[in-house]
Amino acid sequence: ARARTLEDILKDKGVITAEDYAEATRNPALAYYQPGKGMTIETADGNYKAQIGGYAQLIYRYSDYDDSARNNKSDFDIRRFKIQLKGHLVNRKFGYKFQGEMAGGFKTEDAYLNYKFGAPLVLQGGQFKPPQARQELTSASRQLFPDRSLANDTFNFGRDQGIQIAGSFKHKLLQYRVGVFNGNGPNISNPDNHLMYNGRIDINPLGSFKMNEAGFPPQKALLNLGASFSYNTVTGDDVGSNFDKDNDVLDKALNLDAMTKAEFTTAYGKDLKVQVMTANINYKWSALTMAGEYYAMNADPEIGEDWDADGYYLQAGYQVLPQTLEVGVRYAAIDSDSKTATRQVSAEFDKSETQVGVNYYFNKHLAKLQTDLTFVQDDLKNNGDDVVFRMQAQFYY
Amino acid sequence: ARARTLEDILKDKGVITAEDYAEATRNPALAYYQPGKGMTIETADGNYKAQIGGYAQLIYRYSDYDDSARNNKSDFDIRRFKIQLKGHLVNRKFGYKFQGEMAGGFKTEDAYLNYKFGAPLVLQGGQFKPPQARQELTSASRQLFPDRSLANDTFNFGRDQGIQIAGSFKHKLLQYRVGVFNGNGPNISNPDNHLMYNGRIDINPLGSFKMNEAGFPPQKALLNLGASFSYNTVTGDDVGSNFDKDNDVLDKALNLDAMTKAEFTTAYGKDLKVQVMTANINYKWSALTMAGEYYAMNADPEIGEDWDADGYYLQAGYQVLPQTLEVGVRYAAIDSDSKTATRQVSAEFDKSETQVGVNYYFNKHLAKLQTDLTFVQDDLKNNGDDVVFRMQAQFYY
Amino acid sequence: ARARTLEDILKDKGVITAEDYAEATRNPALAYYQPGKGMTIETADGNYKAQIGGYAQLIYRYSDYDDSARNNKSDFDIRRFKIQLKGHLVNRKFGYKFQGEMAGGFKTEDAYLNYKFGAPLVLQGGQFKPPQARQELTSASRQLFPDRSLANDTFNFGRDQGIQIAGSFKHKLLQYRVGVFNGNGPNISNPDNHLMYNGRIDINPLGSFKMNEAGFPPQKALLNLGASFSYNTVTGDDVGSNFDKDNDVLDKALNLDAMTKAEFTTAYGKDLKVQVMTANINYKWSALTMAGEYYAMNADPEIGEDWDADGYYLQAGYQVLPQTLEVGVRYAAIDSDSKTATRQVSAEFDKSETQVGVNYYFNKHLAKLQTDLTFVQDDLKNNGDDVVFRMQAQFYY
């Protein structure tokens, strides 16, 4: 057992009263470790606070490829190792966050400053995730499966640089965020003066519903209805290496990294207007969680016809042993109608994934082990029906 | 209000006297947050101390290009996001600093160890800024404008690897620093045994004048007269990608990144001896700050004639609302006399910039907003007269 | 002198007894600086602990090349600047470590999680050094010379990704570690399903012998006998840029970075089976340290004959002034029998290095200065007998 503190001893001796004791121990320590947030130091007046922490995901994957010409793969990997610096400064209204990815190098992810005028209005500028699908906005550390779904990984914008306003009303019954961004991913400058416009709205009729796909009972029933919309103008100056592949709409849904400026101009003309709409419904009650999200994209080039692509996922999880053992199942699919000879430069896909998984929690998301099996069905490829096994350890430090 | 501490309570009860109270609260905390320096932990004997902090600059730029063939640009960017680790070890004489730039990746900037024999003699080795112009040596976080001047950005050496001695006399009335460096910028090894030699002297007749371009009244009048000199021998082994572009003398003033070893030898022979001299006068009084600095370069190749290039800036700032609102104006120009057919490999320039700016301080350099308008005049280009608007938020974390 | 604490004052006044004083001061601080480990914060129950620190090596080298066509080199360099994050979480059994190299960029080194079932069994997964030669496993900060030997730098595996079990028996009289890894170095995924298998055993008949090549008297006599074995299957998918050069067996001993997949297949067929065996004897007594280690490699291609390569080092150090001044001498050699026309794609070497060094310790490995002179003898090259002078400052922060 820990020794008595000086406060304990003086109270036991009657030098100080129980009220004195309560008062003397009321002031929090100014330097402490906060699980999930890390090393924390603040000033006595509370105006400055800094935290250093992060989380890691270490993974093993076995990929059994349908195509016999490919090597099967047995691979240990550092999937994610994030460092997070966050806090506030000058007063409690100026907040900041930095997040860097240190798995296999160093990549700057979040880097922003915000100012809280109040719950209904928070102004934020820098680099962060624009308003978009709920699964993309949910931290990689709070997913039901070892990673996000096929649909999300095709139609997300990842991070970008820009400015947004966000806020909430009626104890988070209603939340919104709208912003304007460079539109070509993180850590890369905008080659022109076209910007991307994004907005999202969340309705939580049963109360605040944090972005967390796992369900740790006991918990009351929660419901989230959300929708997002974005509009971006892409030109020949944005293609090839002029955008960051963290933006999967540009990378995967539109395949712009495989294109030169000349090819872009021949195929699409001066620009390509891209709209992405998402809608989701998430539900939690006790040990059960359910989520479904739909993604729809329209791409409209200056020359030629526009085309559509879409995707969705449906997933459910249940904690068989509360706080400890969880099972989950997910189906995700993506499809594109650009499968014509004249559209060969763009991405063509018609694919689905079925996943079953088991999670073991040592202490919620602070330390957990996740494992799943993925069955791929690729309708545009012969021999594209791969099977992947994954086991991933996660911890916050 | 904060609760009373145990010391407060015992003093109020008369258990300890006012003298006891003073003594008991004299020892500083060993773990604390220091605004501008960050999270700090030291040992009780004061022999070891470590600090983690840094600062960020988040910028928006609109560039209106004179050349109608170019896209105008509307760009949000992480301009700087520095992490700083510093402190001392073993005893108070061994100091160290690490600084990394995390905007868009990770670049090692400062990495040095020093030993303080006393104020007149500090020995320092590792990677840091060699003695050079005052504006380059002034932190990017302490500039009057969102960034340094055109003249400085053409004639600075950035950081390099080497060793220096520095010191000060008579309460910083006189300061000096001299050193020897690889001569080809940070994070790159020296391809030969030629080194760069640098020295600088500062005279502060009215007392210590910290490198800080802003003026926060009330402050007494301060004057700085400074000069620097450097000598470097560049060979064909240093060109192309064999130097780091942080060294703007090699990158911009001499344009060596656009040159192959063969081109260098044809144009200049075995080597090119480069001298750079700078001189500055800085003045502050109450809300007013004024600074002027001149940069002169001579480049002397083994074959062919030597040539000169120079530049300067003149700037003034005034805090209309003390500690809060500052206005500034700057004129900077650069010129090179290498504008002949036989010298096409080297940089040619004849350019000036006029800037007007407004700064809003939330708490000095700890949190500020800077905005300015730049009018470029490029006399070697048709359609080079661009206009750039910038707005930049800075904070220390 | 430091002021008396409140506990001191209350004891002096007789408010608390000596026993009370002892109890009140028994609880350790929860935030403190630990030399060698850095800034430390833990929770009151001891279940979570985080530390941030690291060490740096700043070096100057003068290389006098035997080949008159090469420039001699005079080079200041950041040799190493490591950041280390480590601690435990949830309870004292879950440990983790992250180490990044920040010299000239950012490279992820260690990134692992382990679980201590007890001293005889620790399970560890992620990225770290596989079981191999003792000198490679000894931290770069605990070497007798500024860097490891020629033999070690030819036959080590560096870091890799995988999983191992390790443990010790009878107060570290016997230690073991065995594991399975991707086999192609850190931060790179496995292109196939071949894995590398590694094991190591250590016998310390005179008691626990930490991996530290310096000898700080007084210390009792210590002896270590160790051996390691590894088996790896390399295919044409692993060559060129498909492995990380931190693995010197692949990079230097086999020269696979200079090979294309087609060249590999022509020369070796489907795969190349590589075995490396090492054995060492290390001894310490008072001011003296001695170490010898032998490395043997066999490479067996699918087509053609197998070949061998080997190397060793012998070194001794003596602290002339205990804890302060140490002198050392080392001889290392490497040889390969692949010197035939049919084997030109593989590495050929026959080289030795003689080194003499002097170390000055300010405070053991926390702050030291190391200098040495290396005489190279390269029997496969004309004019390969170079001489290198090194001086390196090291500090933990």
Image (spheres, coloured by chain):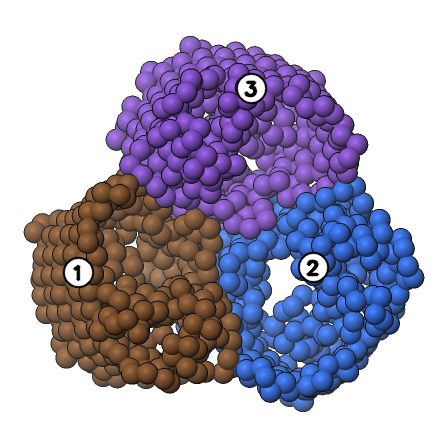
Chain colours: A blue, B purple, C brown
Mark 2: which secondary structure?
helix
Q: Is residue C17 above or below residue B352?
A: below
Which is more toward the observer, C385 or B279? C385
Q: Does any portion of residue B279 appear in the rendered image?
A: yes
Which is more toward the observer, B141 or A192? A192
Residue C293 appears left or right of B14: left
Dot label at residue B349: none
Marks 1/2: CA–CA distance: 49 Å
- State the residue position of label 2: A257
Mark 3: which secondary structure?
loop
* Total residue callouts: 3
**Please, which residue is most extreme toward the front here?**
C341
Badge 1 and badge 3 in a common chain: no
Q: Residue at x 40, y 64 (%)?
A: C258
Residue C90 appears left or right of C374: right
Q: Residue at x 66, y 48 (%)?
A: A188
Badge 1 and badge 2 in a common chain: no
Mark 3 crowdedness (10 Å alpha carbons): few <14, some 14-19, many ≥20: some
Mark 2 crowdedness (10 Å alpha carbons): few <14, some 14-19, many ≥20: some
- What is the chain identity of the residue bearing mark 3? B
Q: Is residue B347 above or below residue C54?
A: above
- State the residue position of label 1: C379
Residue A99 % position (x, y): 60, 55
Mark 1 crowdedness (10 Å alpha carbons): few <14, some 14-19, many ≥20: some
Look at the numbered discs 3 and 2 and tell me whether their residues touch, using CB distance below 8 Å: no
Q: Amino acid at mark 3?
A: Lys
Viewer-nearest of discs 3 and 2: 3
Marks 3/2: CA–CA distance: 40 Å
Dot label at residue B339: 3
Residue A144 appears left or right of B205: right
